[in-house]
Every structure is written in structure tokens, then in C-alpha cells.
């Protein structure tokens, strides 16, 4: 495949081809038919890109996926780089790339604007993948469905009225998550995220023009939006916006292909107002998230009980854990699907932050592996969950207990902080890293990401990261709290709970409410490293978890959990 692409570049005298892990909706999870990066390289991570020149192939991924890339990609053909060490702009300069072609649907207006400072960006005249990818899968034909207002909290008509009052020009909505949120509609077009592939124009009168595969629109959906929205075939969107004299769009979200041929000089490039409104959950969504996390806690606690009491634990595999936790979630009311591919990494597999068990890599849970990193989540009609717990498979060494406890101390510090209005995640990130830093240790990923409500498990604009994101945390936002530590080739540790930003007792200050309802592994903690306040937090958190799930566990599991969290170490 690499040779074909390089021949294509030679014929057209273009220096490079850029292939991001993306689709035209800029979502994290994409359909198999859009997996162009995987098709050319074999890399299956959810973030990364390929830069192919006339004489080499470069695969770039961040620290979560570099180990995975090394396992999946033919390193005789591909050079793997960590995106934190070398940006795309750096690669262009290093390899003297003056011209680069790209599918204009897979790159945003903002990205192209930045890249034009370094390279001539040449959009495809015709997509060459139509010639290269002969057995390309067909797109999804899953039907759209409505999300009842008992879960969304606000009717679509009221959301439309609110957004219309905030804009003065027709608004282009190019992210399908935003269309789904606005209309209280969902779909099953991609794995793990209940989105309907669609884009929309909200006109100044408050009418929504929705562009999608019309075969997905059921009679129920069409009837629900009479007088509110009109549905069009997705291939008419580009021509439709040509007839709009002035358009408001978000350059960070809008595919370059949609703006190439626009001649309007007065278009308004501004942030999409839906992004922030979607991030700040309303009361119904907040209560739904609380309910979803109690149910999800039951599923995870049942899994931890099964692991702890299994008579032949060492014969269990990582994939057995993946299957069991899914079976437990399926028992919970309103469960729809996992919110991402479950990460169950034992021993050395835990060192890869986003390791996904597969038949080739699947390991038994051997005692000598000592630790199992289990990161999983669920999509429920009333909320989205994401939780990581690291489990001791056998007696840990003092060094392992120290690592486990240092990560836990950072988790507690972030969970208990009180912060003033205007604080961003970048301001708080150090709280989670401070104890690791004191021992010369760190982790390469961010500390927290935003989470949607029965939408994407990774949702912006809020984040907790040392890399600098300037969106202030506001009440109603949900963000993960997930410091970690990854020890060479031996094990990985991560503690993740979801936190809801709420008002504190002090005017103008906020704090976190921990949504996740699952205990930590007490046998893995070095209690000598915890302060009295940290021990008190852990005690109260565990008893709050127990109180939340009472009556939902079997007597055997409840007795086990009561005894487990009362262990004195």
C-alpha cells in the first residue's frame, strides 16, 4: 500500500500525503469505512496520523498509543514518532516538505490555516482511496432514534430557541454530537458513541435543516420534528450553504471541504455556542449521570468480586474480564453499549495506557503479573460512565505499593480541591502529579477529559492537563480524574473516577462531586504514605459507595464488600 501511495505522489509531484484518524464529523470513533489510517498502516488507535512522503512513511501517535503502534505497524516500512516530541509542523520542516495533499473532509479550516504557514495544502481533486480500497466496508444504515426529554431534561424546541437567540447569522453545526444534543436524537453509526451521522444549519428563524442519510429517518423521527426541522440528503449540504450569503461556523470543527468554494467575505468564524452549553449538564442530566454511575458501580463491583473470589483466577484471561464486565453492564437498566473498548491490561500489558486485549496479546491473570489495570465504561440512556481501577492479583512489593499510593494521593488531592471561578484544568493538573513528581515520576497523558451525557465519553471543551487548555471549569461540567503511572515493561497503574463540578460552600468557588461508585483496592495501598485527611477521605468515600449500592448487590457480594472495605492496613 505504501508503494502505491508513493507512486501517486511521484506522478503528481506532491511531496507528501497526510492521513489523520478522522472522519468528516471529527469524532473520536469512526466507522470501519472511514478507517483510512488503519487501512494504510495497520494502526488501530483512536488518535494519530500518517505522513507519507515519496520515500518514507511516518506514523505519529501520542504517548497513550506509541506502544500500540509499535505492536501493530510494520516498522520496516514505518517510522513511529511520539506527537508530543515532534508536531506535524516539525515533521514538515525536518523532511523539507513543501506540498502536502489531504482529504479536505478530514481536516478542519483551523488546521489548514495553521498548516499553510508551513506547507502548500492541496485538497484531493478526487479521493484516491476509491481506487486503492477495493473491499471498503459500507457505511452504517442504523436508524435514528429519539432521546426522551425525561433523560435530556430540555426539549429540542427549547434548545433551538436558546441557540437561535445567541446567534445573528445561520449557524453551521458540523459535529454530529452537537446535532444529536440539539435535537435530542441519537444513532448507532459508530462504536461506543450513540451518534447519528449528520450536519445541520440553524437558520435565523429557528428552523433546523438537517443533512444525513435519509434512509435513517424513521416516520416517528420525521413526525416528531414537523415544523421544527427539515431533513435533506447529506450530499446536498455543500450546495445548500453556497446559497447562504453569510454563515457562522466554527473553524476548529468545520471540514475544510465545506468552505473551499465559499465566496462570501462576511462569514463569521466563531466558537460554536453549542459546545459549552452541551458541556454544562442540566439538572436532569446531572441526576441521570448520578443514577448511571450507581448502576455502573454495581456492574464493576460484581466484576471485582468475581475476580477476587474466582477459584481458578490464574486461568482467567484479560478477554474473560472484558466479557464478564460487559455481561454485568448488560444487566443494568437503560444500558445501551460500552462507552469505549475495555482496557484490561495485566502485568506488562498495563504499561500501555490504552491497551486493548486481543487474541494475539491476551494474557492469563498470573500472580507474577501482580497488577491488572481495568478501564471501562458504559453508555446508558441516562448517562455515560468511565472508570479505571487497578487491582492487585497477588501480594505487591513495597515499591509497587508506593507507586499505587502516590497515584491515589494525586487522585484524592484533585477530588478534594476547592477552586475559584475562572479556574481551568491546566491550573489544577499539578495537584494530581505532585506526589509522583516528588519521586521523579510522571505520566504522559492528560489528567482529565470532559464526558458527555449519553454522547461521547471524551467531550470538550474542558480538560485537566498540563498542556494548557484555557476553558474554565463551570458547574454542570463532568470531567475525569485519572492520574497514572506506567513502570517500564512491568505494569501500569491508573485511578479514574468521574467528577461533577458543583458550587462550593464559598461564594465564587467550586468543587468536585465524585460520581463514580466503586472502591479502590485496599490491599494495594501503603497506608503509611497517606495523611490522616487522606485516610479519612478514603474511609468516607468507601462507605458512600457502599451506601449507594445497598440493595443492588447480592447478599454474598455485599458481605464481601463490607468486609473488604473494613480491612485495616
Image (cartoon, rainbow, N blue to C red):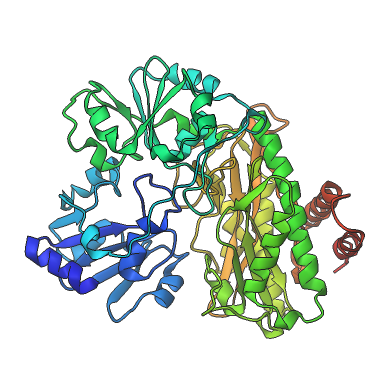
**Residue 153 at least partly seen:** yes
- Indicate the position of residue 250 as horizontal and vertical percent values: 34, 34
- Indicate the position of residue 516 as horizontal and vertical percent values: 71, 50
In this view, which residue lies farthest toward the top? 205
Q: Quadrant of the N terminus?
A: bottom left
Residue drawn at 57 percent across, 32 percent down: 421
- Indicate the position of residue 451 as horizontal and vertical percent values: 56, 45
In this view, which residue lies farthest toward the front? 219
**Residue 403 at least partly seen:** no
Instruction: Tell me: 484 left or right of 515.
Output: left
Q: Quadrant of the C terminus?
A: bottom right
- Residue 566, located in which quarter of the rendered image? bottom right
- Indicate the position of residue 252 as horizontal and vertical percent values: 34, 40
Residue drawn at 35 percent across, 17 percent down: 168
Nearer to the camera, 278 or 310? 310
- Residue 214, located in which quarter of the rendered image? top left
Nearer to the camera, 317 or 542? 317
Residue drawn at 62 percent across, 72 percent down: 319
- Residue 291, located in which quarter of the rendered image? top right
Amino acid at each position: 500500500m505504501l508503494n502505491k501511495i508513493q507512486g501517486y505522489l511521484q506522478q503528481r509531484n506532491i511531496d507528501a500525503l497526510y492521513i489523520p484518524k478522522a472522519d468528516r464529523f471529527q469524532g473520536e470513533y469512526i466507522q470501519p469505512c472511514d478507517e483510512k489510517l488503519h487501512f494504510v498502516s495497520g494502526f488501530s488507535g483512536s488518535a494519530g496520523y500518517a505522513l507519507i512522503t515519496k520515500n518514507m512513511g511516518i506514523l505519529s501517535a501520542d504517548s497513550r498509543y506509541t506502544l500500540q503502534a509499535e505492536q501493530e505497524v510494520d516498522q520496516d516500512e514505518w517510522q513511529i514518532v511520539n506527537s508530543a516530541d515532534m508536531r506535524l509542523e516539525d515533521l514538515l520542516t525536518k523532511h523539507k516538505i513543501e506540498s502536502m495533499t489531504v482529504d479536505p473532509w478530514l481536516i478542519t479550516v483551523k488546521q489548514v490555516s495553521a498548516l499553510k504557514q508551513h506547507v502548500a495544502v492541496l485538497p484531493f481533486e478526487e479521493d484516491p482511496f476509491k481506487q486503492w480500497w477495493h473491499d471498503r466496508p459500507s457505511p452504517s444504515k442504523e436508524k435514528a432514534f429519539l432521546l426522551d426529554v425525561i433523560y435530556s431534561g430540555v426539549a429540542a424546541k427549547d434548545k433551538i430557541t436558546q441557540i437561535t437567540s445567541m446567534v445573528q447569522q445561520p449557524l453551521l453545526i458540523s459535529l454530529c454530537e452537537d446535532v444529536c444534543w440539539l435535537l435530542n436524537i441519537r444513532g448507532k453509526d459508530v462504536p461506543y458513541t450513540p451518534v447519528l451521522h449528520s450536519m445541520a444549519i440553524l437558520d435565523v428563524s429557528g428552523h433546523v435543516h438537517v443533512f444525513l442519510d435519509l434512509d435513517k429517518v424513521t416516520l416517528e423521527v420525521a413526525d416528531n420534528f414537523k415544523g421544527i426541522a427539515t431533513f435533506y440528503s447529506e450530499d446536498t449540504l455543500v450546495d445548500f450553504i453556497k446559497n447562504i450569503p453569510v454563515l457562522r461556523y466554527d473553524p476548529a470543527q468545520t471540514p475544510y471541504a465545506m468552505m473551499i468554494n465559499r465566496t462570501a467575505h462576511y462569514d463569521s468564524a466563531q466558537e460554536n455556542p453549542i459546545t459549552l452549553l452541551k458541556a454544562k449538564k442540566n439538572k436532569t442530566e446531572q441526576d441521570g449521570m448520578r443514577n448511571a454511575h450507581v448502576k455502573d458501580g454495581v456492574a464493576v463491583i460484581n466484576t471485582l468480586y468475581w475476580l477476587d473470589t474466582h477459584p481458578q483466577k490464574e486461568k482467567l484471561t484479560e478477554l474473560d474480564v472484558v466479557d464478564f464486565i460487559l455481561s454485568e453492564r448488560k444487566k443494568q437498566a437503560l444500558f445501551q453499549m460500552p462507552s469505549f473498548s475495555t482496557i484490561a491490561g495485566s502485568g506488562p500489558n498495563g504499561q500501555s495506557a490504552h491497551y486493548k486485549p486481543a487474541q494475539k496479546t491476551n494474557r492469563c491473570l498470573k500472580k507474577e503479573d501482580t497488577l491488572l489495570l481495568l478501564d471501562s465504561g458504559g453508555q446508558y440512556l441516562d448517562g455515560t460512565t468511565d472508570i479505571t481501577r487497578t487491582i492487585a492479583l497477588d501480594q505487591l512489593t513495597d515499591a509497587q505499593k508506593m507507586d499505587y499510593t502516590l497515584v491515589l494521593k494525586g487522585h484524592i488531592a484533585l477530588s478534594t480541591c476547592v477552586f475559584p471561578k475562572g479556574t481551568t484544568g491546566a491550573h489544577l493538573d499539578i495537584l494530581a502529579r505532585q506526589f509522583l513528581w516528588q519521586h521523579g515520576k510522571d505520566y504522559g497523558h492528560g489528567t482529565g477529559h470532559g464526558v458527555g451525557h449519553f454522547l461521547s465519553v471524551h467531550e470538550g471543551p474542558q480538560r485537566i492537563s498540563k498542556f494548557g487548555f484555557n476553558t474554565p471549569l463551570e458547574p454542570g461540567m463532568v470531567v475525569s480524574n485519572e492520574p497514572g503511572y506506567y513502570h517500564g515493561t512491568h505494569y501500569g497503574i491508573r485511578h479514574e473516577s468521574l467528577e461533577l463540578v458543583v458550587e462550593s460552600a464559598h461564594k465564587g468557588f467550586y468543587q468536585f462531586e465524585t460520581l463514580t461508585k466503586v472502591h479502590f483496592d485496599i490491599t494495594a495501598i501503603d497506608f503509611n504514605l497517606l495523611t490522616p485527611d487522606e485516610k479519612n477521605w478514603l474511609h468516607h468515600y468507601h462507605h458512600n459507595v457502599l451506601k449507594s449500592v445497598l440493595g443492588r448487590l447480592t447478599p454474598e457480594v455485599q458481605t464481601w464488600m463490607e468486609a473488604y472495605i473494613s480491612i485495616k492496613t
